[in-house]
Image (cartoon, rainbow, N blue to C red):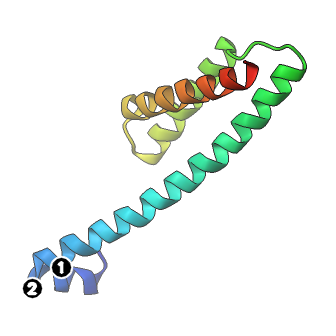
Amino acid sequence: MLNKQEKNRAESDPLQELEQLRERIDKVDEKILQSLAERFELVSKIGELKRRHDLNVYDPERAQEVENKWSSYAEQSGFSPECAIKIYKTIHECSVNAQKSIQD
């Protein structure tokens, strides 16, 4: 949602507004990637723990639990649950692959 000042600028220069919105998206993208990096640090620690204790990399019950949480969080945030699940499945696949590489 644009504030009053942004709205006034947008009406006078839509290209400037477009650039400002893109800059905001870039900042959000940076935060997403920082969060993913943090998540994958934790994934590595979990992979090490599973390796030391001879635990399975893939836990279908946990995967379903997290998928359900993503869907719920998305719905609460006004974001498409279907889109959120697609993103989660991609992240989960990368997480499992990272843990498998630790197991080898």
* Front residue of this view, candidates 22 and 43: 43
Picture quarter with the N terminus: bottom left
Determine if residue 1 is in view. Answer: no
Picture quarter with the C terminus: top right
Q: Which residue is drawn at 45% across and 28% down?
A: 85
Q: Which residue is drawn at 65% across and 41% down?
A: 40
Where does residue 54 sit, x and y in percent of width and height?
86, 13
Q: Which residue is drawn at 11% across and 75% down?
A: 14
- Picture disc at residue 16: 1
Few, some or many residues within 10 Å of mark 1 (<14, 14–19, 20+):
some
Q: Can you identify the residue that label 2 sits on?
A: 12
Report the number of discs. 2
Few, some or many residues within 10 Å of mark 2 (<14, 14–19, 20+):
few
Q: In this view, does 1 lie above or below 5?
A: above
Which residue is situated farthest in the right direction here? 53
- Residue kind at label 1, given as amino acid type: Gln
Q: What element does badge 1 sit on?
A: helix
- Picture disc at residue 48: none
Q: What element does badge 2 sit on?
A: helix
* Front residue of this view, candidates 52 and 34: 52
Callout 2–callout 1 Cβ contact below 8 Å: yes
Where does residue 13 sit, x and y in percent of width and height?
11, 82
Q: Which residue is drawn at 33% across and 70% down?
A: 23
Q: In this view, does 91 lie above or below 53?
A: below
Q: In this view, does 55 lie above or below 9?
A: above
- Residue kind at label 2, given as amino acid type: Ser
